[in-house]
Image (cartoon, rainbow, N blue to C red):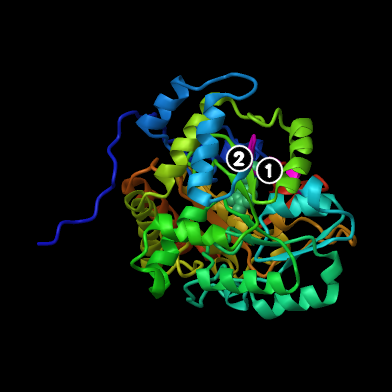
Amino acid sequence: MELPFAESYKIKVVESIRRSTREERENWIREAQYNLFQLKSDQIFIDLLTDSGTGAMSDIQWGGIMTGDESYAGASSYYKLKDAITDITGFPYFLPTHQGRAAENVLFSALIKEGDVIPGNSHFDTTKGHIEFRSAVAVDCTIDEAFDTTLSHPFKGNVDLGKLEDVLKKSGDKVPFIILTLTNNSAGGQPVSLENMHQVRKLADIYNKPVLFDSARFAENAYFIKIREPVYQDQSIREIVEEIFSCADMMTMSCKKDAIASMGGFIAMRDPELFRQCSMFNIMFEGYITYGGMSGRDMNAVAQGLYEGIDFDYLETRIKQVEYLGNRLLDFNIPLQQPIGGHAIFIDAKRFFPHIPKEEFPAQTLAIQLYLEAGVRGVEIGTLLADRDPVTRENRFPVLDMMRLAVPRRVYTNNHMDVVAVGLKNVFDRREEIKSGLRITREAPIMRHFTVELEPA
Ligand SMILES: *Cc1c(COP(=O)(O)O)cnc(C)c1O
């Protein structure tokens, strides 16, 4: 008999979590104005809000926490991180920042001006926020296949080269760089193929544009390349990662994702002049260039986490768990983005609740229902997240209105995944009894989803 698959680690430290009653949850969610960000963590049983900063660190990472060098300038922890980044990505220059969006803030301060146009595959919400905050425009050039959740395509994160070239032709002089998000979070944690990265690189060279990789999940992307892109099946994750970054001029990183740390980010690049410009903004916004908002202990944890994050056995354990949850949901006929992505399951709320109008936020409604049913917290990736159009102030209705269930790294067992799956099945079985959604009572002008207040419609 073939031995079954099992995790590539064992558990050394645990944290208690508590179940609650439906009645308790009904009160808590009302007090939270139907915004799951406003709940207290002890009001949640299984928290799939995000895979960001929620991973379980290894014994070696915790060891690094104890040996962090907290010198203001030139700390050994800084050099340890610098060596890890250069070793793994090949970029010679790097600046630490406190997290990924801070990396965007620093880099975009040097590169983006009013009226600029930044094409790429689906921009992450903070990336888009930092672009629009500078009165520039993010243009989504993702392939059309990504917007049909019923279509299976191995690389739904890919850029449509025709769409990208149109933007470069039409507004070429306004394009400071092209951005690729690995994996494409907004499209469902979908990877970009190396073939597509090379094609984007070629086009960028023709139009003389630098390429930025938003690299939060570069290791998960590399895993999918190994598994799904036949020419790379015999290459190691290390080799694939090296080839990925050979296609880019610069990267931003949220270390809260594939570096499996609680906090941290960085920018890395090849151009020494860009490094000098960014250093100035880094000192203003983040901290001196050898810590940039991170403590020495965090830099140690990130340096180690970067290596653990590209370990094949770890990646296989992680992605197979997400797949396990996805397959259970598919067995219950629950509509979700396929193929199953790297860090999360994306439930297609338009197909789950076809009778709830888009103006009543079907995906947010679903996330609330799942919380009430099972104490599981997911998150809306849809109309609330899309914000209003900055010019017309009308709601933007994205093609996909999804509820994301993001799985933290090395945290939950498949028993927890079973609770999530059955909880969602129970909501699905009585979906027709849930007749209406939600309406907004209060919202912020930008990135409203974090603080929006809602009530039943
Ligand atoms: C999380 C994330 C960011 C922002 O990083 P933070 O550490 O949350 O500030 C940027 N891009 C992508 C693709 C991300 O997933």
Image side of residue 324 versus residue 128, left or right: left
In three-dimensional space, the C-alpha distance between marks 1 and 2, rounded to whole angstroms, equals 6 Å
- Sooner in the amino-acid sequence: mark 1 or mark 2: 1
Are circles 1 and 2 on residues that touch, CB within 8 Å?
Answer: yes
Amino acid under disc 2: Gly
In the rendered image, the vertical position of residue 9 relative to residue 337, given as above or below: above
Q: On the image, which quarter does residue 31 sit in?
A: top right
- Callout 2: CB less than 8 Å from ligand 1: yes
The span picked out in magenta is 94-107
At a point 64% along the width and 73% down the height, the residue shown is 202
Front-lying residue, 431 or 300? 300
Determine which residue is flagged by label 2: 265
Task: Determine crowd level at label 1: few under 14, some 14-19, many 20+ residues with C-alpha closer than 10 A.
Answer: many
Quadrant location, the N terminus: bottom left
Determine which residue is flagged by label 1: 103
Image side of residue 393 versus residue 223, left or right: right
* Numbered mark located on residue 131 in the image: none
Taking the view exactly as shown, the residue that stands out farthest to the bottom is: 162
Front-lying residue, 10 or 226? 226
At a point 37% along the width and 49% down the height, the residue shown is 311
Task: State yes or no: residue 104 in magenta.
Answer: yes
- Callout 1: CB less than 8 Å from ligand 1: yes
Amino acid under disc 1: Ala
